[in-house]
């Protein structure tokens, strides 16, 4: 599955989403649940001390790591390789896919099991491996559901949040499930179905929550136990990581793992925090013999050294998504990117360009709830504004009509004569549309605005005329000695 | 044997260029201005930590009991019976003998992991009802058993059977992840090898992926129990 979700233009996607009342209800109750849990595990947990200080700790760790990214990536790859693992640096999604395909081919792999990983979604890894004749199985429960139902993720922590239990039961029927829609029974079915797949797979693929540079270790933060299966029984383990997902040492790992578990799902720690350090020559029976680490850029470096660098501090907890009023109403799919919500609206244009994702920074009320929720203090709403600035400045090739309108405005506004004529003409031109002092249904560029509310009719008197008149009046009053100054 | 590294130079040069750095330039490790993690539960006594850990077990659906080294064998028997005994698998860990548990393992015909036997170890673990492990470090805050898995102390034992029983020496209880990470980092600084699979496990596997309803027991164990041993 590529980074892009669906083929609908952004505003059409929004239209479809806000009318899907089941989805909107499911998303808002999930948001409420996750947000409540996060609050009690963060500012609500007095034993932690000052949560703001935890956020500052996270921020300084992420900033230092990103500022010295080349050094830590070098250290990570040296240590991973020193323990017998193989490291591949992929500048593009295609390079990453090709490398994984090559490894699977060399191993003659037919069965691949995967633990949840956004970056492998981003680079469309499953499709690439399926083309090579591999069976690729998602094993995270939510991802398994989506895969069985040919659906796409709508949240980065709970990808199937938009689906209800009946839909899930119906999806499982395709695999011969005959039980009820009880979540326990559904999960039991996944356990039974996947157990033998884990034990017999040739290759296990995971993402990477954090890598530790000073030992070449990979840390996975999970709950279901599937990632442990994926990293234990297949002979070959391939870890795909976004190049920014690392920390210098285990001491910093402590802080970011704590921030992640508490901010994403409100747990003190998730059920499994698993740290894997390659040991290719050991005799262990339940361990891979061959380790591969694929470090992916795929557009991330676009943010380095720019105003957007802090977007790479993200630890993928989705706390910003869980507080976003826009996400609440349109869900994840409308964003058209596997990274939805505020962080998605910041990240997607960096990774995929303004042409494709330039509209996403407008999917925000700029209320700044996201920035406040972020455990590593990414100023998300400021980055959204910066994106908008760059987009209209032309960095994002704004649509032809919008550019023409802006150009027209700049010509009109720079000539006093045209400007004056324009302000005088507006009430006359718009007169046919006015009902009871406002415009309920506007054409062209006014349409999206009047779809939801009325546009006030332009005043017959323009500001310059009003100001002139007002000045005269106040001069008269002052001359009489009774006026108050403005 | 050293592994390969491909495509690194151009990749890192691009990054370093954007950051105005030369590749590999060693950064000065900052003295962090914020270290809230070090103050959490810093003055708790062993007993306070134990009490906190027991309380944390409630929220992770984990059974916990406490005994001393004299009562350990009996307690373990009770728990094994409670969970329906059946086939049992244990890690290869000399502490079982040191803690006086060899007889219990023998009486229940527990299979002790032996990597020399190859793949049949996994079969044994997959068909076992109960897996027995001994904790290396216990995080009180979250009731998390830290297991430093290797070829003998196998990860499968706490992963494949339906029930996982973990013996927790009270002396292994620390406040939180911070102390465990410091322990690991100290090993690294002393040039010691890091265990290839460090597992921090907090209770039975679970998922809330279906309508945000918590289901306990997904791919890993469905039930987890801890036995704290007060004088070990």
Image (cartoon, rainbow, N blue to C red):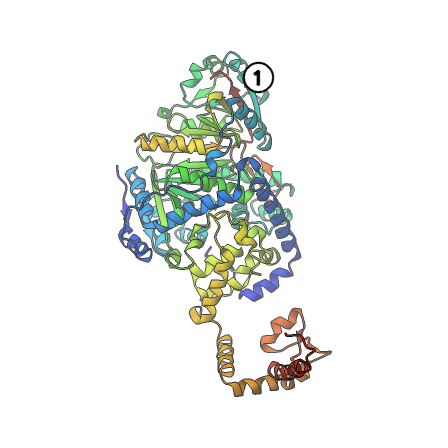
Q: Relative to A422, is A350 on the left or the right?
A: left
- Callout 1 secondary element: helix
Quadrant (top left, top right, bottom left, bottom right) of the C terminus of chain A: bottom right
Question: Residue B108 or B164: which is nearer the viewer?
Answer: B164
Residue B4, x across and y down, in percent: 27, 44
* Displayed quadrant of residue A107: top left
Q: Chain of mark 1?
A: B
Q: Is residue B124 above or below residue A300?
A: above
Q: Pinpoint residue A220: horizontal percent, then vertical percent.
A: 44, 40
The reply to whether residue A197 is in sight is: no
Q: Is residue A428 above or below residue A190?
A: below
Q: Residue at x 38, y 25 (%)?
A: B152
The residue at which mark 1 appears reads as B78
> Residue at position x 59%, y 31% from top?
B61
As rendered, which of B15 and A462 lies closer to the eye? A462
Residue A195 seen = yes
How crowded pointer 1 is (Cα within 10 Å; few <14, some 14-19, many 20+) is rated as few
Tell me: residue A136, above or below residue B89: below
Q: Quadrant of residue A304?
A: bottom left
Q: Position of residue A196 (x, y in %)?
A: 48, 37
Corner quadrant of residue A190? top right
Q: Position of residue A433 (x, y in %)?
A: 67, 81
Q: Is residue A80 left or right of residue A434?
A: left
């Amino acid at each position: 599955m590529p980074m892009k979700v669906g083929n609908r233009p952004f505003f059409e996607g929004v239209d479809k989403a806000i009318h899907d009342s089941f989805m909107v209800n499911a998303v808002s109750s999930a948001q409420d649940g996750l947000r409540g849990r996060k609050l009690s595990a963060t500012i609500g947990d007095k034993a932690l001390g000052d949560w703001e200080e935890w956020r500052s700790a996270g921020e300084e760790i992420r900033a230092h790591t990103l500022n010295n990214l080349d050094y830590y990536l070098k250290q990570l790859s040296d240590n991973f390789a020193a323990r017998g693992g193989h490291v591949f640096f992929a500048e593009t999604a295609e390079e990453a896919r090709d490398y994984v395909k090559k490894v699977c081919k060399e191993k003659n792999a037919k069965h691949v099991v995967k633990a949840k990983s956004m970056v492998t979604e981003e680079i469309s890894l499953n499709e690439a491996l399926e083309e090579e004749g591999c069976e690729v199985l998602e094993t995270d429960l939510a991802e398994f559901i989506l895969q069985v139902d040919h659906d796409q993720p709508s949240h980065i922590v709970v990808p199937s949040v938009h689906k209800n239990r009946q839909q899930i039961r119906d999806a499982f029927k395709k695999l011969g499930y005959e039980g009820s829609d009880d979540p326990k029974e559904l999960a039991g079915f996944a356990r039974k179905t996947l157990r033998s797949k884990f034990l017999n797979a040739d290759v296990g693929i995971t993402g990477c929550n954090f890598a530790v540079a000073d030992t070449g270790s990979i840390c996975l933060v999970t709950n279901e136990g599937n990632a442990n299966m994926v990293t234990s029984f297949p002979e070959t383990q391939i870890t795909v990581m976004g190049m920014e997902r690392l920390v210098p040492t285990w001491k910093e790992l402590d802080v970011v793992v704590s921030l992640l578990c508490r901010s994403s799902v409100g747990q003190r720690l998730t059920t499994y925090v698993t740290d894997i350090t390659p040991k290719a020559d050991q005799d262990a029976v339940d361990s891979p013999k061959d380790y591969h680490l694929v470090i992916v850029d795929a557009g991330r470096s676009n943010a380095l050294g720019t105003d957007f660098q802090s977007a790479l501090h993200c630890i993928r907890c989705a706390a910003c998504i869980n507080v976003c009023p826009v996400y609440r109403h349109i869900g994840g799919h409308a964003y058209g990117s596997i990274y939805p919500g505020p962080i998605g609206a910041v990240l997607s244009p960096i990774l995929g360009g303004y042409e494709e994702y330039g509209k996403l920074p407008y999917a925000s009320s700029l209320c700044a709830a996201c920035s406040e929720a972020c455990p590593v203090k990414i100023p998300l709403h400021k980055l959204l504004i910066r994106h908008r600035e760059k987009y209209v400045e032309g960095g994002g090739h704004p649509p032809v009509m919008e550019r023409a309108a802006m150009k027209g405005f700049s010509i009109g506004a720079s000539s006093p004569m045209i400007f004056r004529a324009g302000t005088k003409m507006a009430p006359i031109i718009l007169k046919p549309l006015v009902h009871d002092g406002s415009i309920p249904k506007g054409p062209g560029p006014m349409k999206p605005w009047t779809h939801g509310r009325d546009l006030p009719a332009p005043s017959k008197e323009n500001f310059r005329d009003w100001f002139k008149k007002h000045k005269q009046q106040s001069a008269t009053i002052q001359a009489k000695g009774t006026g108050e100054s403005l | 044997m050293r592994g390969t590294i491909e495509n690194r130079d151009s990749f890192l040069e691009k990054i370093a260029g954007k950051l105005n750095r030369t590749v590999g330039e060693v950064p000065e490790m900052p003295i962090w201005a914020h270290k809230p993690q070090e103050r959490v539960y810093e003055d708790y006594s062993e007993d306070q930590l134990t009490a906190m850990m027991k309380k944390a077990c409630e929220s992770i659906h984990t059974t916990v009991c406490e005994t001393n080294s004299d009562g350990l064998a009996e307690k373990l028997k009770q728990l094994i019976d409670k969970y329906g005994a059946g086939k049992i698998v244990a890690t290869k860990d000399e502490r079982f003998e040191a803690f006086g548990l060899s007889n219990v393992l023998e009486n229940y015909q527990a299979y002790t992991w032996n990597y020399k036997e190859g793949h049949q170890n996994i079969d044994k673990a997959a068909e076992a009802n109960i897996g027995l492990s001994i904790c290396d470090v216990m995080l009180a805050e979250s009731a998390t058993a830290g297991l430093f898995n290797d070829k003998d102390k196998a990860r499968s034992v706490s992963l494949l059977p339906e029930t996982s029983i973990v013996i927790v020496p009270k002396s292994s209880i620390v406040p939180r992840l911070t102390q465990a990470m410091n322990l690991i980092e100290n090993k690294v600084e002393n040039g010691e090898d890091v265990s290839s699979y460090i597992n921090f496990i907090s209770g039975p596997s679970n998922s809330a992926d279906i309508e945000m309803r918590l289901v306990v027991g997904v791919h890993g164990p469905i039930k987890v129990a801890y036995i704290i041993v007060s004088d070990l």
